[in-house]
Image (cartoon, rainbow, N blue to C red):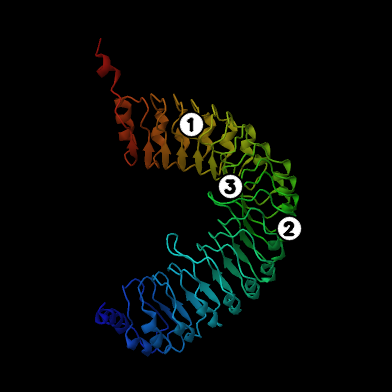
Amino acid sequence: MKNKTNDYKKVLEIMANRDIENTKRISFYNKELTYLPPEIANLKNLTSLDLGDNTINLKEAIPILVQLENLTELKLNYNNLTELPPEFAQLKKLTSLDLSLNNFKTFPSVIGELKNLTELEISAHRDGDKFSTLPPEIGQLENLTSLSLAEQNLSTLPPEFGKLQKLVTLNLESNNLSTLPLEIGQLQKLVTLNLDSNNFGTFPTVIGQLTNLSELDISGAWDKVKLSTLPPEIGQLENLTSLHLKNQNLSTLPPEIGKLKKLDTLNLSYSQLKTLPAEIGQLQNLKDLNLYRNNVTELPPEIANLEKLTHLNLTSNGIKTIPVEATQIKSLTNFDIAYNSLTSVIPEIGQLQNILWLNLSKNQITALPPEIGQLRSLKSLNITHNKLTTLPPEIGQLSNLGGLLAYENKFTELPPEFGNLHNLGDANLSDSELTTLPDEFAQLQNLEKLQIYGNKIPKEVQEKFTKLLPNCDISWGATIVSIEELFGNA
């Protein structure tokens, strides 16, 4: 049996440094405790107690905890608990209870006696024991505003769930839900709903009744059933600001998506989309549109109406030409169109006057247009893994460029204007076919890191720029000997 004395000593040492009468919050997190000393009861004004990451013996601890008349917040997460004793119901003043990362095989129905709870966290550990049902007693927690049941094995929710009408935040991520009870529609105060990684083959239309929802995540999981369509009811969620639908089997979106006028974040990555409806252009507050890993080959003209869009991700879509419509979105600051089938960059790219971060990597681009130099706000440019043999002189006009990723190309030379990139601090030009550098390269006195290995630059050129750029960490890789050393002075 574990020695209580050692546990008592650990706790009392922490308490010794506290003003017992005025201490309101105290943590014994990860102290390898099983037992609590009776002296804990002297913390009469304690409101918050953190016992997380221990192995607390609750039957012995509860008689002590009930003496803490002002205790409202209790953390027992990661305590390897498998059940709660009936005496737990005595902690009736609790308003916040964290029981996450334990090993409950059934939901402790005694929790239903804690009628003052406003926050309950009882998510499971990914590899721990889980419960598959909720008892009717869950409905007794009518003061709950926040409830997390993530990583359990729930396949259904009881009708009593509808009694939790003060809920504002509900996390049901990583369960096995395929439907939601109609009573969910009674949760009219719900603002945040997380249904990520469940088994919804069809979108639960009852969600459309939750008209105060601001954040909805109903993304799929690799090994679970996925949505193939969105119903018109999605348009009823007119207060949504964030919608995550990643990893689904959607081919398009319903026109009603355009009714979500308050939406600022729309994540549709990995969702098999082929087209976007014209109504996407009605999302006047949209700032972040993520279409990563879909099958979209063109954008509707109406996308140019997204006047507040700052982040557009079109990576991995099989796009052959940069959509002109994308370059008409003047508010864009981050544009990612990597891993597509681009062979060129349209001149209209120069219209993106506010762009800060541009990713054109992993394409088949053979040249950049002169208009690239018009992107005066650009701070980061990624053109790696293309077929570029040089850069246009206008590259030197990117006066704010701080980072350049350009490795795995076919560069044989760089223009003298490259030396005008006075704010360049980090550049990767490795694995290309460079045999020299322009003299103007020495003007890059703010360059701190240069990776240029995998080229064919002779030793004397390496030595020259190592001296001219003394504050730069240069990775030349294997040294290419000079012609004289290779062939002699014949």
Label 3 and label 2: CA atoms lie apart by: 21 Å
Judge by depth and name the residue closer to the eye, 285 or 51.
51
Residue in the image at 55% along x and 45% along y: 356
Say above or below: 59 vs 466: below
Label 3 and label 1: CA atoms lie apart by: 38 Å
Q: Position of residue 135 (x, y in %)?
A: 56, 73
Q: Position of residue 104 (x, y in %)?
A: 45, 70
- Left or right? Give the position of 198 relative to 71: right
Q: Nearer the viewer, mark 1 or mark 2?
A: 2
Specify the label residue 269 is tagged with: 3
Residue in the image at 43% along x and 68% along y: 103
Disc 3 residue type (three-letter): Ser
Q: Position of residue 150 (x, y in %)?
A: 52, 64
The residue identified by callout 2 is: 233
**Dot 1 crowding, Cα within 10 Å, few <14, some 14–19, many 20+:** some
Q: Position of residue 310 (x, y in %)?
A: 61, 49
Decide which of tag 1 and tag 2 comes sooner along the chain: 2
Decide which of tag 3 and tag 2 comes sooner along the chain: 2
Q: Secondary structure at mark 2?
A: helix
Which of the 4 image quarters holds residue 353? top right
The residue identified by callout 1 is: 417
Judge by depth and name the residue closer to the eye, 133 or 210.
133
